[in-house]
Image: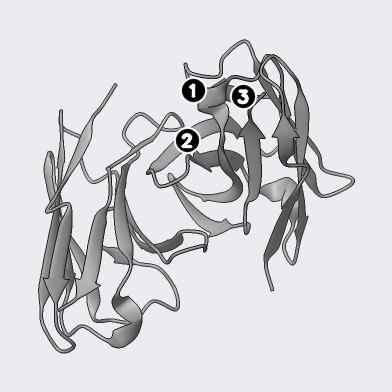
Amino acid sequence: DIQMTQSPSSVSASVGDRVTITCRASQGISSWLAWYQQKPGKAPKLLIYAASSLQSGVPSRFSGSGSGTDFTLTISSLQPEDFATYYCQQANSFPQVTFGQGTRLEIK
Amino acid sequence: EVQLVESGGGLVQPGGSLRLSCAASGFTFSSYEMNWVRQAPGKGLEWVSYISSSGSTIYYADSVKGRFTISRDNAKNSLYLQMNSLRAEDTAVYYCARGKGRSFDYWGQGTLVTVSS
C-alpha cells in the first residue's frame, strides 16, 4: 500500500497568513494527488485534484503543486473560513486510494 | 444541485449486519463511478469500496473484503453497502462519494455506524 504522510499534523496561523501543508508519498505517484478540506461535523470538500488543478468554485487562494513523492497545498492569505482539517489523497493506485492522516489548521 | 443522502446507519452488535443506502439526485447517476469512504470517530478518512458506473467493476479495501458488498441501482439513482460480520473497528461515519476522475467531488453528509454490544 502507498502510505501518505502529511506535515505538520497541526499548525496555528492568523488571518492573512500564507500557509503551506506538505504531503509525502511512500513511492512515486506521478501527479495523482488530491486535497480535501473538512470542517467539524461536515463531509470533506474537494479543493485540488491532479496535484494542481483547482476544483470548480474553490477560491484561487488555494493552490497545489508537486509530483512524484512530494506535494504541497498552499493557502496564500488565510480567511476565517479556512480553519479546518486538510487531507491529501493519493490516486496512483486508483480506485484503491489512501489518505494522509490530516493536518489541522487552527487559529493563532 | 448535486445531492447525496446516506441512510441506514445505527447501532448494531458485533457480528451483525447493516445495509447503507445513498440516494443521489441532481446529476445523471448512471454516468458516474461511486465510492464509500469511512471515518472512525476522531480519525482520518479511509476508502472502503468502489463501483463503476455500470456496476460491472467493483473493488474493496482489504479491511472489508469478504464482509462488505457494494451495489447500485441506476434506475433508482441509489448506491448501497451491505455490511456483514461487523466488528468494533467498523464503527465510523460512512460517506458515499461521487467519483471525479481519480478523486471525489461530491460527498453525502454521512451516516454513523456504531458496532457495540
Asked if residue A12 is positioned above or below residue B70 in the image, the reply reads: below
Same chain for the residues under marks 3 and 2 in the image: yes
The one of A12 and B103 positioned closer to us in this rendering: A12
Circle nearer the N terminus (3, 2): 2
Q: Quadrant of residue A32?
A: top left
Left or right? Give the position of A93 relative to A105: right
Secondary structure under tag 2 reads strand
**Where is residue A65 drawn, in percent x and y?**
15, 59
Name the residue carrying label 3: B58
Q: How far apart are marks 3 and 1 (CA)?
A: 11 Å
Give the chain letter at badge 3. B
Amino acid type at circle 2 is: Trp
Same chain for the residues under marks 3 and 1 in the image: yes
The reply to whether the C-beta atoms of the residues labelled 3 and 1 are less than 8 Å apart is no
The one of B42 and A4 positioned closer to us in this rendering: B42
Residue at the top extreme, as displayed: B66
Secondary structure under tag 3 reads strand
Give the chain letter at badge 2. B
Q: Which mark is residue B72?
A: none
Density class for disc 2 (Cα within 10 Å; few <14, some 14-19, many ≥20) is: many
Q: Residue B47 carries which label?
A: 2
The reply to whether the C-beta atoms of the residues labelled 2 and 1 are less than 8 Å apart is yes
Residue at screen point 63% across, 36% down: B114
| Res. A68 visible in picture | yes
**Where is residue A80 drawn, in percent x and y?**
30, 86
Nearest to the eye among marks 3 and 2: give it: 2
| Res. B52 visible in picture | no
**Where is residue A23 drawn, in percent x and y?**
16, 48
**Where is residue B106 drawn, in percent x and y?**
56, 59
